[in-house]
Image (cartoon, rainbow, N blue to C red):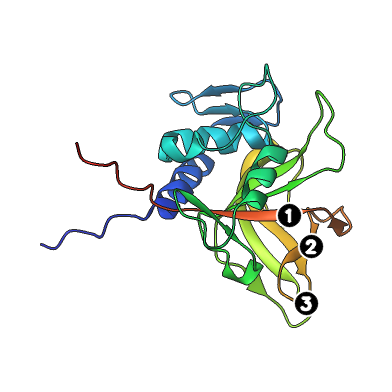
Amino acid sequence: MARAPALSLRAQVASQAEFIVNNLRQTSYEYLEQIDVDRGIYDCDCSSFAGFVLARAAPGHYAMIPQKEPGQPRPRAFEYYEFFSSLTPESAGGWRRIDLLRDARRGDVIAWRFPRILKNHDTGHVLFVARNPEVNSAGIFFVRVYDSASKPHFRDTRGEAKEQSENGVGSGTIKFRVDNSGRPVTFQFGPADQFESLPIAIGRIEPLPAAPQS
């Protein structure tokens, strides 16, 4: 019997995030991370969730995300944005930048940052792409994501059941608009929000270079 093909790194990252979303028992959006895998508890913010998933699925790649703030347990959202922005579509060595939203794929990471970075406040947002983007006749892109969020997105798993929190880890759809070249420039986080313009960057995980043989 033929073996199933090995999952790509992107697929492994997405599968790890999806497994958590489908199997969690308790979640809330919290800055003070409390994750207990055995009990299915995921109380964390967006960067804690992203860091936890990457540390499990691709620890070498996670270690490449710069952490500039002393005293922070994990890189925050703006650091993902700045790292992805520093790359090019031709970057090698573990990560590269994806410029056009239509080229984003399941397992890619999208991040944006706020203009001002304040202590004890959100610095932006970071998420995993759950499905390849879809676009409607008006040019609006619909991107299904896995993330930890303070409120639900469109068609969101958060709050589906009475006992389920409306914030924390889950999966939903975010709407994006792109510029004339196809780069994402604005997003609509959820039904209660307007489109917001912030710097957005997409990162794609790639195989690390092989270690030189001694």
User: Is 11 placed left or right of 28 in the picture?
Assistant: left
Q: Distance between the residues labelled 3 and 1?
A: 15 Å
Who comes first in sequence, dot 1 or dot 2? 2
Q: How crowded is mark 2: few (under 14 residues within 10 Å), some or many (20 or more)?
A: some
Residue drawn at point x = 89 percent, y = 57 percent: 194
Q: Which amino acid does label 3 sit on?
A: Asn
Q: Identify the residue at horizontal 63%, vertical 56% (top origin).
A: 202
Residues at discs 1 and 2 in contact (Cβ within 8 Å) = yes
> Which quadrant of the rendered structure holds the C terminus?
top left
Q: Name the one closer to the observer, 90 or 13.
A: 90
Secondary structure of the residue carrying tag 3 is loop
Q: Is mark 1 on a helix, strand or loop?
A: strand
- In percent of width and height, residue 61 lies at 46, 40
- The numbered dot on residue 180 is 3
Left-right relation of 50 to 1: right
What type is the residue that disc 1 sits on? Ile
Q: Does any portion of residue 155 appear in the rendered image?
A: no
Q: Mark 1 highlights which residue?
A: 200
Residue 2 appears left or right of 161: left
User: Badge 2 is on which residue?
Assistant: 185
- Tell me the quarter of the image containing the N terminus: bottom left
The CA distance from mark 1 to mark 2 is: 7 Å
Residues tagged 3 and 2 counted as in contact (Cβ below 8 A): no
Name the residue at the bottom extreme: 137
Amino acid, disc 2 = Val
Closer to us: 13 or 58? 58
In-front residue for pair 105/210: 210
